Amino acid sequence: MVKIGDIVTRKIYGEDMQFCVLGFYTNQRTGEKVAILALLDPNLIVEASVQELNPVSARKLFALTQNFVH
């Protein structure tokens, strides 16, 4: 069972692209469980001091993905 925070690939992309599972929702039309994914791009990996970081609530994170969820 895939959980929030897991790193996954998509069958259509093979092993070339990795994603982090951000959350789930149920498609209201089909009843299918759908995962919200963030692409992990090695070109976008950065380092930062822990003191420099601010947590993001799950509610705000889902609000950021609102345009992608249908």
Image (cartoon, grey):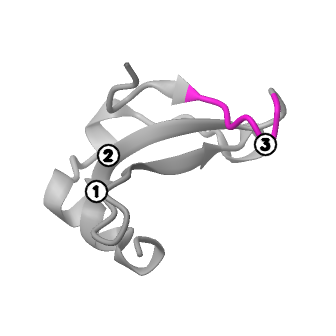
Around disc 3, counting alpha carbons within 10 Å, would you say few (fewer than 14), some (14 to 19), or many (20 or more)? few
Residue 23 lies left or right of residue 46; in this view the side is left
Q: Secondary structure at mark 1?
A: strand
- The residue lying at 44 percent from left, 25 percent from top is 6
- The residue lying at 28 percent from left, 55 percent from top is 25
Residue 37 percent location from the top left of the image: 50, 48
10 inside magenta stretch = yes
Marks 2 and 3 sit apart, C-alpha to C-alpha, by 20 Å
Magenta stretch: helix, strand or loop mostly: loop
Residue 8 percent location from the top left of the image: 58, 28
Residue 14 lies left or right of residue 26; in this view the side is right
13 inside magenta stretch = yes
Marks 2 and 1 sit apart, C-alpha to C-alpha, by 11 Å
Residue 28 percent location from the top left of the image: 27, 69
State the quadrant of the C terminus. Answer: bottom left
Around disc 1, counting alpha carbons within 10 Å, would you say few (fewer than 14), some (14 to 19), or many (20 or more)? few
Give the farthest residue toward the top.
1
What's the mark number on residue 26?
A: 1
Magenta stretch, residue numbers = 8-14
- The residue lying at 74 percent from left, 37 percent from top is 42
- Residue of label 2: 23
Q: Secondary structure at mark 3?
A: loop
Residue 37 lies left or right of residue 60; in this view the side is right
Q: Kindly report which numbered mark, 2 or 3, lies closer to the viewer in this rendering.
A: 3
- Amino acid carrying label 2: it is Gly
- Residue of label 3: 12
From what the image shows, is residue 33 above or below residue 21?
below
Name the foreground residue: 2 vs 21: 2
